[in-house]
Amino acid sequence: MSEMQLTGVAPRNRKLKTKSTKTKNPKLFIAVCTIPALLLTLVFMIIPTFRAFVMSFTDATGMSDENKFIFLDNYKYMFQDEMFLKALSNTFKLMLVVPVVTLAFGLVLAFLLTQTKLKERGFYRTVFFFPSIISLTVVGIIWSFVFHPNMGILNNILSSIGLDQLTMTWLGDSRTALWCVAVTLIWQAVGYYMVMYIAAIDGISADVFESATIDGAGYFRKLVSITIPLLKEIIGITFVLSLAGTINLSFIVVTIMTGGGPAGGTTVLLHYMYTQGFQNANFGYAMAIAIFTLAFAFVLSFLSRLLTNRAEG
Amino acid sequence: MNIINWITRLFLIVATIVLLYPFVWNLLASFKSNTEFLTDPFSFPQALHLDNYVRAFQKSKMGSYFLNSIFLVVLSTAILVIFVVPIAYVLTRFKFWGSKMILNIYMACIFLQASYIMVPLFIQVNSFGMLDNRGMLGLIYAVLQFPFAIFVLSGFLRSVPRDYEEAAKIDGCGNTGVLVRIIAPLAKPGIVTVCMLAAMGFWNEYPLALVLIQTDSKKTLPVGLANLFEVQRYATDWSALFAALILVLIPTILLYVVGQKQLLQGISAGGIKG
């Protein structure tokens, strides 16, 4: 840094001229840096959200230009709409299962990779993280083939170990279709959260584990009594992330793997919004669904901010 | 103790198989001819039917989809960097009225994702008359990434020492100069991480590309692929479909191999710093 001290006396004269412009400049500079980005965010994120909110109180459709305010009718209709309730219950089921299983596997894998000091640790980390960077579209298509009744990997494995009677059309059966979606979502996300956990565990001092080993604690004991309590913060954060992610990503998986079928067996909130908006052109109603889902997710984001603030403080 | 090690190894190997086998299967299937596949989907291919890849390219317009996606990724990433670096810099280094509020707004917006505002965005872009416009889609992609990018970059910039800027200012460097000549190079690791994460997202994005682009030749890879899948469900050229899938995976794999460290760092930091 010492080279900076000797940059000479000569520029000082020039500085006298620039000093007065410097006190003006910060404001202009700040404005130039922030206003364009803020404007764009306003136009493409905030205004659409606002528009969705307003439109959800109208009966707007793609057919006519006349929008009448019908206030809460859309929302009232929502809760009597069988399909909506199905979408809600499906989304809810996914949110119960997917985050818990994803994070559990992520945690176990992270623990295994950090605690057992295997040399292949880096290799496994790379491999397990890989599915989460793949386009979810590709994941959906590949897993459609896994579940395929004739060519599928799953049925093939079942018949080769003699469990022929368990083979079925996984995606075509309303009892199993939703869980196939869940498995796909879990499979895709495990590596992502595993990486976060590995970083967090690496942050726990090694001495803590060593003294536990000296005291005779086995792997399982260490996991339960040391790792999990100390990781409470990050588990909380990832849980909320996973909840929000499930709502969001379920749209893509459902659209590609099942199209919402069979008979609404896998339709989720966002997918139903899509069908209402783009297939039925019921814009007003679709917006109501969107706002509902958004409010749902917003509450989650609020929770996550609370957790984050606590973590920093 | 050793037993536990072996159980662990076994578990990890099983996990690896579960997580990788679908890809391997896909890869093998992409080299088989259609009849080969239909007779036995699980055997090793007898010969490398590269014509599958050729058909994937020609029949299904993979070429155009590829180019469209590449165009979008480059455009969106460029827009993202140009807008986000200045605002992240200003939000972390300057204390002015509204700076805290702006930061909070962006934090809250991180969860406002494309899927929720698909419908109103569609209506809005339609009213601009800009539907079916790839440039517009690129702009929207970038803007939707602002919150997360600002979050990561401002976190990163906070840990960059101020000494260099202060020294530069003493030398008479103006704010713009500091931004361009000092901050931008210093923040390169952070910018690279943001770019990689964003580029991945842009390459894989589906909902907006589905809704805002209509003409088939302008569609992006994920949408094109999904259409292909729909069509091929009832047709019989699956091998071309598998080849197409592998083709789509290649850029992602390349980027992963090259940028793995930064990607993983970005995700870890994002998770810990919350």
Image (cartoon, helix red, strand yellow):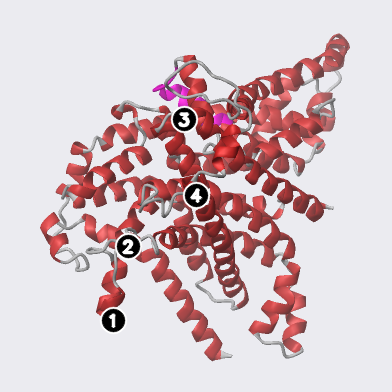
Is A208 on the left or on the right of A165, as rendered?
Answer: right
Distance from label 4 to label 2 (Cα)? 22 Å
Check if residue A166 falls in the magenta segment: no
Tell me, yes or no, whether dots 4 and 2 are on the same chain: yes
Distance from label 3 to label 1 (Cα)? 49 Å
Residue assigned mark 2: A147
Name the residue at 16% across, 60% down: B37
Q: Are marks 3 and 1 in contact (CB under 8 Å)?
A: no
| Parent chain of label 4 | A
Nearer the N terminus, badge 4 or badge 2? 4
Q: Quadrant of residue A32?
A: top right
Could you tell me which secondary element the residue under label 2 belongs to?
loop
Q: Are marks 4 and 3 in contact (CB under 8 Å)?
A: no
Specify the label residue A87 is tagged with: 4
| Parent chain of label 1 | A
Tell me, yes or no, whether dots 4 and 1 are on the same chain: yes
Residue assigned mark 1: A161
Whether residue B113 is visible here, answered yes or no, is no
Residue assigned mark 3: A282
Prevailing secondary structure class for the magenta stretch in the rendered image: helix
Could you tell me which secondary element the residue under label 3 belongs to?
loop
Q: Which amino acid type is marked by label 2? A: Phe
Q: Which amino acid type is marked by label 4? A: Ala
Specify the label residue B144 is tagged with: none
